[in-house]
Image (cartoon, helix red, strand yellow):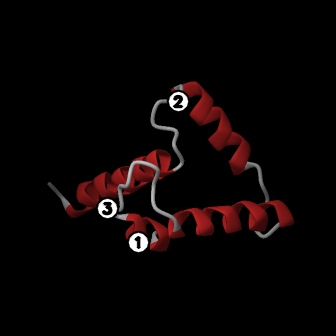
């Protein structure tokens, strides 16, 4: 596996962890995509962007409902 493929696989793994952390692992894929497309429209640095980011920062500080803690620190630091 090339370095680029490993990096891409790791990125997908971390994104999947974020979906699980948000409690959306059983959500409909179209719903998730629609939500992400709406989020993509939020202007970086806007009050709404800061508000949503603050919610995410706090969520990374709390344990997942199922007790999973794997990769939480890495996901919080990942860009």
In the rendered image, which residue does mark 1 sit on?
73
Label 2, label 1: how many angstroms apart (C-alpha)? 24 Å
Is disc 1 placed on a helix, strand or loop?
helix
Q: Which residue is at a point 39% across and 56% down the rendered structure image?
A: 14
Residue 71 locus on image (x, y percent): 34, 64
Measured along the vertical axis of the image, is residue 65 above or below residue 52? above
State left or right for residue 47 relative to residue 37.
right
Q: Earlier in the sequence, mark 2 or mark 3?
A: 2
Label 1, label 3: how many angstroms apart (C-alpha)? 8 Å
In the rendered image, which residue does mark 3 sit on?
70
Q: Which residue is at a point 83% across and 66% down the rendered structure image?
A: 46
Which numbered dot is residue 50? none
In the rendered image, which residue does mark 2 sit on?
27
Graded by Cα atoms within 10 Å as few (under 14), some (14 to 19) or many (20 or more), the crowding at tag 3 reads few
* Any part of residue 38 in sight: yes
Measured along the vertical axis of the image, is residue 24 above or below residue 6? above
Q: Earlier in the sequence, mark 2 or mark 1?
A: 2
Q: Residue furthest left?
A: 1
Q: Which residue is at a point 70% across and 48% down the rendered structure image?
A: 39
């Amino acid at each position: 596996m090339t370095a680029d493929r490993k990096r891409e696989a790791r990125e997908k793994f971390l994104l999947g962890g974020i979906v699980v952390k948000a409690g959306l692992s059983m959500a409909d894929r179209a719903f998730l995509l629609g939500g992400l497309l709406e989020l993509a429209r939020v202007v970086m640095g806007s009050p709404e962007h800061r508000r949503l980011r603050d919610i995410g920062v706090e969520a990374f500080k709390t344990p997942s409902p199922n007790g999973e803690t794997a990769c939480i620190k890495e996901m919080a630091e990942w860009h």
